[in-house]
């Protein structure tokens, strides 16, 4: 049983003759009759009785009709759903991001996407790069924007931007010169992303560097988000590490008493797009990634000068 046979069957049923149905479908009448005959042969029952030049449906034809209509309607709906996805006139764009994406152009990307494609819903997923990578690998997400390093097994990884990490303190003596990993090992540290530990890319970098130097990094305070870390640092409870992109977006909300310096050997968060290796991305995912790349590239340009890599505690606030 084919969709074509069902279409020809319904056309004959509505037209009342094979010749009229064929004319409606712009077909040769023998072609339509042959397909209906094959359908009858497969079903093992006559669907029409021939009456003069016309046809009369049997009870089997009446029984088949709603199912044939439902099958063709389902195919039409499926085709329309695919067209909507292809032309971004419906559906949902699901995209994974790292936990601090809100400090980057995350909201700008969503806003730009919705302005261009208001009929497409947006779903932003992810609290940490490691879980986004796992979701993409498992096929739960098409693509994501993550901070490296992540486990790249089964993934295509395309770096697009890096953001320098600086050492932040309210104590002027601690930010007079660039810091080293050995300095970090004896510092009163406040680190973020406590729930993910070494699955967090920044922590992973730090602990790998510490291993090479033969030292241990043990934070005195563990928190989840950068704002909490900055507030505690401003209260003099320790020092923290913050990416300049976050400082850029905080602007004048950065407490004036805080200062920062880079690392002696610069340390970066590197951001990259990921998708399953060899997978074909949907139009929505491709569009979302294109917008994300535009916004991240623009931010990378701004970070070349703002905020400064060094800032004294108590000096004029950046931004």
Image (cartoon, grey):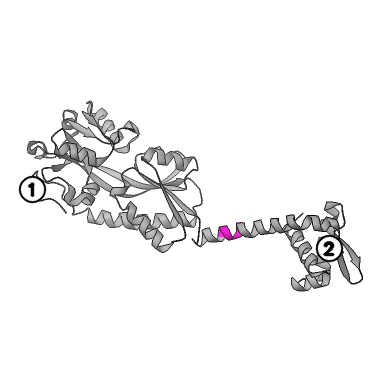
| Along the line of sight, the residue nearer the viewer: 67 or 36 | 67
Q: Is residue 68 left or right of residue 188?
A: right
> What residue lies at 46% left-to-right and 43% top-to-bottom?
136
**Quadrant of the image occupied by residue 298:** bottom left
Sequence order check, earlier mark of 2 and 1: 2
> Whole-percent x and y of residue 155?
45, 43
The 10 Å Cα crowd at callout 1, few under 14, some 14 to 19, many 20 or more, is few
Magenta-drawn segment = 78-82
> Where is the C terminus found, in terms of image quarters?
bottom left
Residue corresponding to mark 2 = 34
Q: Secondary structure at mark 1?
A: loop
Q: Secondary structure at mark 2?
A: helix
> What residue lies at 23% left-to-right and 51% top-to-bottom?
249
Residue corresponding to mark 1 = 315
The 10 Å Cα crowd at callout 2, few under 14, some 14 to 19, many 20 or more, is few
Please check the rendered image and state whether residue 256 is part of the magenta-colored stretch, yes or no: no
> Whole-percent x and y of residue 239?
17, 35
Does any portion of residue 264 appear in the rendered image? no
> What residue lies at 14% left-to-right and 45% top-to-bottom?
255
**Quadrant of the image occupied by residue 185:** top left
């Amino acid at each position: 049983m084919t969709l074509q046979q069902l279409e020809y069957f319904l056309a004959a049923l509505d037209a009342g003759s094979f010749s009229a149905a064929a004319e409606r479908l712009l077909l040769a009448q023998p072609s339509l009759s042959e397909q209906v005959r094959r359908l009858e042969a497969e079903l093992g029952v006559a669907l029409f009785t021939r009456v003069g030049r016309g046809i009369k449906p049997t009870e089997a034809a009446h029984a088949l009709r709603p199912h044939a209509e439902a099958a063709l309607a389902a195919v039409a709906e499926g085709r329309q759903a695919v067209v909507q996805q292809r032309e971004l006139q419906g559906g949902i764009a699901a995209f994974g991001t790292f936990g601090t994406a809100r400090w980057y152009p995350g909201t700008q990307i969503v806003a730009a996407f919705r302005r261009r494609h208001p009929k497409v819903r947006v779903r932003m997923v992810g609290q940490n790069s490691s879980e986004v990578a796992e979701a993409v690998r498992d096929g739960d997400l098409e693509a994501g924007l993550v901070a490296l390093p992540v486990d790249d097994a089964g993934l295509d990884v395309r770096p697009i931007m890096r953001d320098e990490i600086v050492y932040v303190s309210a104590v002027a003596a601690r930010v007079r010169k660039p810091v080293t990993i050995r300095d970090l090992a004896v510092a009163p540290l406040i680190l973020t992303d406590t729930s993910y530990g070494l699955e967090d890319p920044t922590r992973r970098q730090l602990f790998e560097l510490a291993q090479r130097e033969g030292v241990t990094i043990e934070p005195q305070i563990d928190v989840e988000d950068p704002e909490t870390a900055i507030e505690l640092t401003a209260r003099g409870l320790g020092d923290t590490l913050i990416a300049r992109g976050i400082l850029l977006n905080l602007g004048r909300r950065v407490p004036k008493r805080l200062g920062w310096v880079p690392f002696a050997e610069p340390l970066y968060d590197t951001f990259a797009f990921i998708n399953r290796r060899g997978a074909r991305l949907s139009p929505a995912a491709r569009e979302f990634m294109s917008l994300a790349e535009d916004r991240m590239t623009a931010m990378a340009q701004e970070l070349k000068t703002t905020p400064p890599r060094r800032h004294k505690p108590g000096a004029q606030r950046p931004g």
